[in-house]
Image: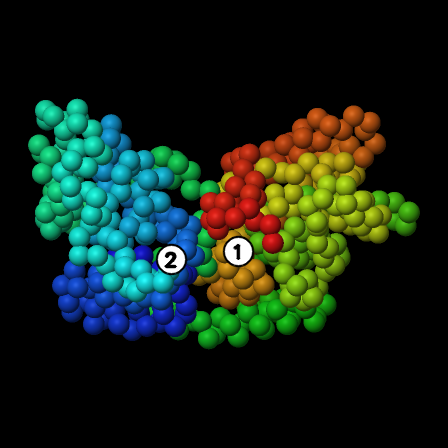
Amino acid sequence: MFPYFMLVAFEAGSLLRALLLLILYPFICMFSKEMGLKMMVMVSFCGIKKDGFVVGRAVLPKFFLEDVGLQGFEVVKMCKRKMGVSNLPHVMVESFVKEYLEVDYVVGKELKVYNGYFIGLMEDKNKKKIDNVHDLKHMLGEGEIKGSKVFGISGTKSSLAHPFFRFCKEIYLTNEEMKRKWQALPSENYPKPLIFHDGRLALRPTPISTLALFMWLPFGIILAIFRGVIALTLPQKVATPILTFTGMRLLTSATTPNPKSSSKGEKGQLYVCNHKTLLDPLFLSYALSKPLTAVTYSLSRLSEILAPIKTVRLTRDRDQDGNMMEKLLNEGDLVVCPEGTTCREPFLLRFSPLFAEMNDKIAPVAMDCHVTMFYGTTASGLKCLDPIFFLMNPRPSYTVQLLEPVSGLSTCQDRSQLRFDVANRVQREIGESLNFQCTKLTRKDKYLILAGNNGVV
C-alpha cells in the first residue's frame, strides 16, 4: 500500500512529507501490517486540511484502477447490490470504489479530525453506523439478505471480523498467489472511462521508483532551468540541437505543406490544436520554424512574461475575444487551443466554435506529449510551475502533426449552426489522427471533478 500513501504525502502534503515517508518505510516494514498502516496514515495525513483534500477523487483512482484484477472485477460486476469494505481511510477509497467499481456502499476507516485538520489517527472501528445490524440490513436490503443470495470476497482473514460477513452464506478468500495469476483490468473494460485525473507524479511511486525520483530531483531542477534558459535566449537553429542533446524530442509530420506566412495586408494563418500542456504553442512554433501568437484562457503571469512567443489572455467574453482574435490574425499567424484546458488521457474535450468564424482556412494540428516522471499540467496546483515540471522529465517528447486545412466561416452569412459543424469536424480529424476519443465534456466539467470549482481563475 506504500504507493497510495506516497501519493497522498506528495500530492496533498509536500516534498518533505514524501521524503519522510520514504525514509521511514524500511522501519515500517519491521512492524505488522496493521501497525505499518497506522504509521503510514500518521505520516501522510497529519496536518492535512480535511476540506481541501481532493487526492481521493482526483489522483488515486488512476492508480487504483491499474491494480484492479479482471477476474475479481467480473465476479463483483455480476452482483446486484455491492458493499466495499476496506482497511484504508474512507477518504482515500470512497470516490474510486463508488464511481469506478459501481459499489453502492463503501466502508472504510474514519480519520480523526481536529479544527478541520486530520491528526493522522484512525477510529478504532469502521463507520459506527454500520456496526448496527439493523443498518446493515437496510443497506443490503432485507430481501437480499434472506436466502442464499449474499456472499463475500475477502483478501485477508482479518477482514472477516467485519459485521458485514455475518450475513454471507458463502465467503471466498483470495490469496496473493491467486491474485498474481489475475490479469489487469483493461481500460476498455472500465465501468467509467478515466478521462480526468490530477497530480504531478506520472510514475507509480513504489519504494524503488520513489528513491530514484528523489535522486533525480536535484538534477531535474537544474536540467529544467538549463533547458528553459536555452529555449528563451538562443535562436531556434542553435537551441534545437542543444535541447535534443539534453534528452528532449520533437517529432513532426505533415499531410500538407506548411502554409506560408501571410503577406502584408492579408490575414495570418489560423492554427487550431488540441491542448496537452502550456508549451503547445511553443512546440508548434518550433515545428513550423516561425513565430506565432498564442491565445489562451488560463495563463500565469510568470509564464506570460517568460514566454518566447507572444501570448494573449482571453476573457471568456465571446464578442471581446472574437475582436481580439480578429485583430491578432490581421497582425500575423495565430494558434488557439479551443478545448480551453488540458486533458492527459486519449480524449478530446469539446471544441469552442469561436475559432470557426475567424478565418477562411483553418489548419488543424494534432498534438501529443509523453512524460515518465512528472505531469506538466495541474488543476489544483500552481500553474506557473507546469512548464518546469514538464522540463524536469529525463526525456520529454512532443509530437506535432499538421493536418489538411479546413474551410472556415469568416465570409459566411449564417454562422449560427455551421460554426459548431466546423468545430466538430476539426475535433474529429484531430481525434482520428491521434486515435483519441471525442467527447462533449468541457473545462467546467474537468474542474468540477478534480478541484470542486468551475475553473474560472
The residue tagged 1 is 377
Residue 355 to residue 23: above or below: above
Q: Secondary structure at mark 1?
A: loop
The residue tagged 2 is 50
Badge 1 local density, few (<14 within 10 Å), some, or many (20+)? many
Q: Is residue 137 visible?
A: yes
Picture coordinates of residue 94 (x, y %)? 32, 46
Residue at 67% from the left image edge and 51% from the top image edge: 296
Picture coordinates of residue 258 (x, y %)? 73, 46
Q: How many marks?
A: 2
126 or 114, nearer to the observer = 114
Picture coordinates of residue 156 (x, y %)? 13, 49
Badge 2 local density, few (<14 within 10 Å), some, or many (20+)? some
Q: Secondary structure at mark 2?
A: loop
Residue at 70% from the left image edge and 54% from the top image edge: 313
Mark identifier at residue 171: none
Describe the colour scheme in one phrase: rainbow
Type of amino acid under label 2: Lys
> Quadrant location of residue 160?
top left
Give the mark nearest the N terminus, 2 or 1: 2
Q: Of tags 2 and 1, which is closer to the observer?
A: 2
* Drawn side of residue 119 relative to residue 49, left or right: left
Separation of marks 2 and 1 at Cα, in angstroms: 24 Å
> Quadrant location of residue 36?
bottom left
Residue at 16% from the left image edge and 44% from the top image edge: 131
> Quadrant location of residue 89?
bottom left
* Drawn side of residue 420 relative to residue 143, left or right: right
